[in-house]
Amino acid sequence: MKKNYIIVLFLGITGFANAQEHDKNIGEIEIHARAKVNKEREEFKKHSQSTEIISEYEINRNNPSFIEQSLNTMAGVQVEKRTQLGGQRIILRGYGNDQKFNNWGIKIYLNNMPLTGADGVTVLDDVNFGLVNHIDVIKGPAATLYGGGSGGAVRFYIKPETAKGNSVSEQFNTGSFGLFQSSTSATSVGENYSLTANFSHIGSDGYRPHGKSIKNFYNINGEFKLNQNQTVTLLASHGNSLEQVSGQISYDDYYRGIDNGNFAYIRRGAKTKFVTSRVGIGHIWKINEFLSNNTTLFYTGTTGDRIAAGAFETSSGSNYGLRSVFVLNKDWRYFRSQTELGVEIQQSNSTISNHRFKSVNSTEPPILRPLYEGSYFNNINNQSNYFIVEKLTYKPWDLMFLAGVSFNQISFNRKDLLALPGLFIIKGTDLYNKDLSFDKRFKMVATPHFALQKIWENQIFNFSYSEGYNAPTSATSFTTGLNTTNDNLRAEKAKMWDFSIQGLIRNTSIDYQLSVFNIHIKDKLTQLRGTINNAERTPYSYWANTGDQKNKGLEMSVGYSYKPENYFISKIQPFASYTYNDFKYSRFSTYLKEHGSPAAVNVYDNKNVVGVPKTKLTLGLDFDFRMGLYWQNTYSFMGSVYTDFANSNKVKSFGLLNSKIGYKHTFNKFDVDVFVIGNNLTSQVNYTFLFYGNSINDTDMDNQYNNSAVYTDVNPGPSKAYFFTGFNVKYNF
């Protein structure tokens, strides 16, 4: 009934708009709203579903390396992190918070190459966010253009410099928690090329015990015009990232503002370390006046070490492939057609060893279990996506119909490198005595996307249906703690109805976006937690199809750009975003058999989805002064959330107030920006990461609580106000 009502409403609006149609082209209107709006409208029309962007202006309202500060201002988006500068977890419309480490189910890109590997996992520790100058967020299932992923897509961009000439620049930040950050660039832009080389360093003692961060990045970004119709792009980087991990604390300590870290993590020297080399080479080709192509070949190689309270893991892997899209544009008398035909293929090849720590008390040194109780695998994952999208526009009405479909294929192979004859035979007994190698290929899945889009005056109306697809991988199909395979998992599917409006009012000085959506996720893949039947009751994680999830929501954002005349203030720019979530479980249950107890089925129908607040609000107010001063203010409210499926544990809401004051001016050949940033100015208790679902109630015998009934699930944020100061200086030759 609700879907029919929305369809009738949309068609009614379309009919009314046709009666009011005029000949003015929206692309020719001078827009007075926020600087990001032109590009945002382009992406909204391109994706034909709710899409928002964050421009360089929004990114620089705080320290760009703290990417959560900018992404969290957007409606429908949450970003959590386990360490000061790493372990980021992006949640789109309630999807993505099942993973205890990194990201899964959200497709993430850097320029035109996927950061998400063929195994579906995205690590963001090794991305230099200090260079990112543009972000696109496509909310909800978007598998037609981007393959696997039920939650949506996030596209980070490091766009090349366009102003001609040669320059060198230095960006520097220092402040609370021993922050020392520098970014040095040399840029040359000519008639047919743009090239930037950069070295970045960021180090901090962190705001938590055992919370240091050290990152070094080398980056080359270029664009080279071969002729009038062909351009080659290059993005190459090498990064070294080290994040110490403090671990989770109890809720009692969290609410009291006490953070001594978790001794079980600190005693083991918990950390995540990644050394990553990444390169993407693109070719943009205008084949003729109707047909164009954009192809990118990419490669990423990563080595990693991870130490947590329960395990020590080392990994070495590569991910490589290509993404290629052809676009055919054709005009008839009353119709305009655009056809996109593309492919994205990638393979990941990794070797991972994982060894569990023994459960010990606080007086015993941490020791690992024997090698034969661990795992050592070679994993090969393959993922391919073939898609075609047709957009047909009836020009007299500015009415566009979109129909698209993608065909997605995922497969993986696991080879058990410990399953060698005689490797662990001691006194005639094979202590390993198993082979956990296996293959899995999921059948090809078609994911459609349909949309009806109408432009009327300065408003864009869009009604769409889209699907997402997320299959288990070699990592999710194995239970590390038990050393057993879990190859009966089914791929989850997501279906979304979305009605969105992107518009301009008040002589285009006010921009707004409104979205109403309904997402149904079937056979939800959820990370769960169990305990081994041993004296220590050692915890472990595994994945299961737990049922369905229904996400209904409302998202709104609005911004106003006011430019007073004859005042010392040159621009006043307020903005707001609001999110309302009604996310519930349906036919949702967990089946657990733990530490010798009888198997139990727990049903959580109609319970609120964990980790997602009912409401989320961001307010901003910026001032630009004619003498070069500026003042930017942001208030972000995060509503209360449940952490467990039974909705018995509710974590309190909090609000954070941030402010930035600076001065910009050009002195001859120097562009100078000097600023001070203050975050959490009202000293609110807040968190940056929670354990959710059945992964809660994390406890270790040798943490300082020394009580299995005291659960440690909270990664707190800085509970006191903290400050940074810095400058950006650019010299133009």
Image (cartoon, rainbow, N blue to C red):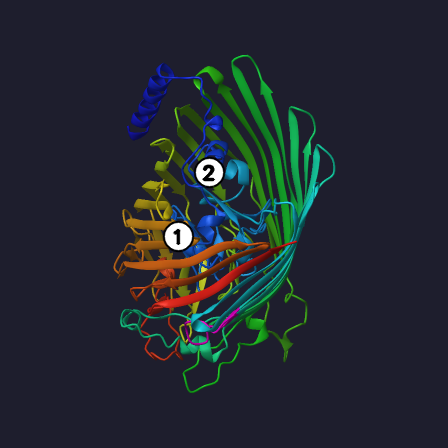
Distance between the alpha carbons at the discs numbered 1 and 2 = 17 Å
In the rendered image, residue 672, in percent from the top left (x then y), is placed at 52, 57
Q: Is residue 205 magenta?
A: yes
230 and 48: which one is in front?
230
Image quadrant assignment for residue 514: top left
In the rendered image, residue 157, in percent from the top left (x then y), is placed at 55, 48
The amino acid beneath tag 1 is Asn
Which residue carries the number 2 mark?
40
Q: Is residue 644 magenta?
A: no
Residue 594 as seen in the image, left or right of residue 400: left
Which residue carries the number 1 mark?
72
The amino acid beneath tag 2 is Glu
Residue 382, compared with residue 640, is above or below; it is above
Q: Is residue 641 in sight in this rendering? A: yes
Name the residue at 51% across, 50% down: 472
Label 2 SS:
helix
- The magenta region covers 203-213
Residue 606 as seen in the image, left or right of residue 446: left
Q: In the orientation shown, which residue stands out farthest toward the top?
A: 333
Q: Main secondary structure of the magenta part?
A: loop
Label 1 SS:
loop
Residue 482 as seen in the image, left or right of residue 340: left
413 and 267: which one is in front?
267
Q: In the orientation shown, which residue stands out farthest toward the bottom?
A: 363
In the rendered image, residue 547, in percent from the top left (x then y), is placed at 37, 47
Q: Check whether the beta carbons of the residues at disc 1 and disc 2 lie within 8 A of each other.
A: no
| Number of numbered markers | 2
Query: Is the N terminus in the top left, top right, bottom left or bottom right quadrant?
Result: top left
Q: Is residue 98 in sight in this rendering? A: no
699 and 498: which one is in front?
498
